[in-house]
Every structure is written in C-alpha cells, then in structure tokens.
Image: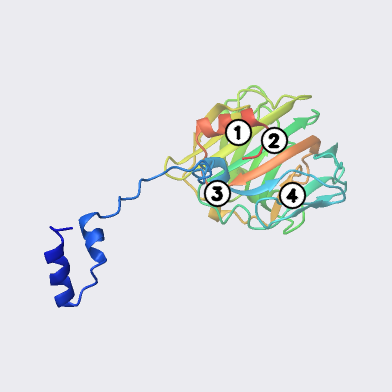
C-alpha cells in the first residue's frame, strides 16, 4: 500500500475514483474463444440439377391433372388418366391418348435439356416421345404436316436421303416442315419393354443438339438455330403434330425440362439417381 498511496492521493486531487487503481494495475483477462457443438453446420451445396431444373412432371396423383412440382406449368392427360402410382400409361395406335403441356415451354429457352424416363411397348415407327411445336392444323390440332417443331421419335423408318438403311431413334428440329429438318439420329431404335432414360441437350455456344440414352452420349449434331424460332403451341408427350403418325404406346415415369445444357457427367449422375430421386 505504501507504493500506491501517492497515486491514490493524486487521483483524489484530480477527482478520479480511487477504485480504478486495481483495474489499471490488474486488467481483466481477455476472453478465450470457445467452440460450441451446437453451432449451425455450413449449408449443403446445391446440386447443379436442382439449380437448372425448371419443370418436373412425375405423374403422381390420379385423375387427369399433371402436376409440375418444380415450376408453375401443370399439364393434362388427354384420353386417359394417371395411374395413382406415379406414372401414366398411354395406349398407342390412334387412341388420342397423350399428355398436353402448356404453350411456350420451349420457345422461351436458350440452352435447354429435356429428360425422360419411360418404357416403350414397341409398335409402329414415328411414335413421339415428345413433340413441341405446331402443325398445319393449328393450335391443339394435328395436321397434314408439322410446321415448326422439336421432336423425338422412338424409331424412324429407313431414310435414303440421309443414307440410313435402318430404323433408329430420331431427334429433329425444323422451322418449316420436313424439308427444313436438322436431324440427329441414335444408332438403333429406342429399346422396347424396358425402362429407359433419354435426354436431349440443346447448347447455343457449341451449336449442338445432343442425344443421350441411359446416361451415355449417342450422338452430337450441328444445330445453329434457336428454340425461340419454334411456334410451340402444341407441346405434347406421346403425340405427333403430324396426323399420320401413331400415338406413343407405353408408360412415362418422369419428364423434366432444364433451362441449361447439362454436361455429360450431370446427365450420367441424373440417370444413376433415377426418376424419383430428390435432387
């Protein structure tokens, strides 16, 4: 205390509180950082599939309304009903059974990926997995020809003009009917009687439309024209814009539209996860 007495007297003269002396002489220890087991975990990374997915049709429920679980573009089953077990089965032939999706799903896209899981029952050529576009019959009607469209058919017929001696899975884009088509063929028809995954990728930068089956690239073909040029007022699963083509015979498990060109690895991952996967 003898050493601090002068300091206490000086503080008293200056009007300071003598009790601060101990605090000045012995400052409190600095807090030690601690960790807590209850701290919030870092957010999980978001799948690239989830980021770019804009429409997802899983065909759940019953009745005729096809719910879009990702976007706001529900469709409708025409001439049939949902199974109640997460799929829709279409009869084929000229049955008038198909899925009608809203207008303008395609023409508003730049890059895009269309992905489907389905089982084809076989039958006549030119059955459409999907056909997005218009016909000479106009909106909501088939015609004597398609006008502008993007379609995917289960199997074509041999095509001498394109040096094809066999029937194959066919993807086609046109702005002015058959004579204006850009075509991308697979090596064989769509397999029948087995659940199959098919994806179509449109990418502007590389000027390609690509065709995948069961996660594997079948073909990548030149396409230097935009989806925005298609008048897509007839957006159909299982029905052609051309009236002479048979309706699709088989079962759809899931159909998706992405607003991006998925990579080969992303498509392989999606195929491996399956149609009912959480993304």
**Residue at x 54% of width, y 47% of height:** 51
Residue in view at x 26 percent, y 66 percent: 19
**Nearer to the camera, 218 or 169:** 218
* Residue at x 57%, y 30% (from the top left corner): 269
First in residue order: circle 2 vs circle 4: 4
Using the rendered view, name the quadrant where residue 95 is placed: top right
Numbered tag placed on residue 275 in the rendering: 2
- Residue placed under numbered mark 1 in the picture: 270
Residue situated in front as seen by the camera: 201 or 207:
201
Q: Report whether residue 161 is seen.
A: no
Label 2 vs label 3, nearer the camera? 2
Kindly state the secondary structure of the residue where label 4 is placed. loop
Task: Classify 10 Å Cα crowding around label 3: few (below 14), some (14-19), many (20 and above).
Answer: many
| CA separation in Å, label 1 and label 3 | 15 Å
Distance, label 1 to label 4, CA atoms, is 37 Å
Closer to the chain start, of discs 1 and 3, is 3
């Amino acid at each position: 205390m003898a050493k601090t007495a002068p300091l206490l007297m000086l503080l008293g003269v200056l009007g300071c509180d003598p009790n601060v002396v101990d605090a000045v002489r012995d400052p409190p220890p600095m807090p030690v950082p601690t960790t807590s087991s209850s701290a919030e975990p870092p957010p999980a990374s978001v799948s690239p599939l989830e980021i770019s997915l804009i429409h997802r049709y899983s065909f759940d429920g019953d009745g005729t309304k096809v719910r879009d679980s990702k976007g706001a573009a529900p469709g409708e089953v025409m001439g049939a009903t949902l199974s109640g077990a997460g799929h829709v089965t279409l009869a084929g032939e000229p049955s008038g059974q198909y899925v009608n999706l809203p207008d303008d799903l395609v023409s508003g896209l730049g890059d895009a990926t269309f992905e489907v899981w389905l089982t084809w029952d076989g039958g006549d050529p030119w059955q459409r997995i999907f056909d997005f576009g218009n016909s000479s019959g106009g909106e909501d009607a088939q015609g004597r020809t398609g006008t502008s469209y993007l379609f995917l058919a289960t199997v074509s017929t041999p095509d001498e003009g394109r040096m094809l001696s066999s029937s194959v899975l066919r993807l086609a884009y046109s702005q002015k009917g058959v004579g204006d088509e850009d075509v991308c063929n697979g090596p064989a028809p769509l397999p029948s009687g087995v659940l199959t995954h098919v994806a179509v990728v449109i990418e502007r930068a590389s000027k390609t439309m690509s065709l995948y089956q069961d996660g594997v690239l079948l073909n990548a073909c030149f396409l230097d024209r935009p989806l925005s040029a298609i008048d897509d007022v007839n957006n159909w699963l299982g029905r052609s814009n051309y009236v002479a083509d048979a309706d699709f015979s088989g079962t759809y498990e899931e159909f998706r539209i992405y607003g991006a060109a998925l990579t080969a690895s992303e498509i392989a991952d999606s195929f491996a996860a399956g149609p009912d996967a959480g993304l």
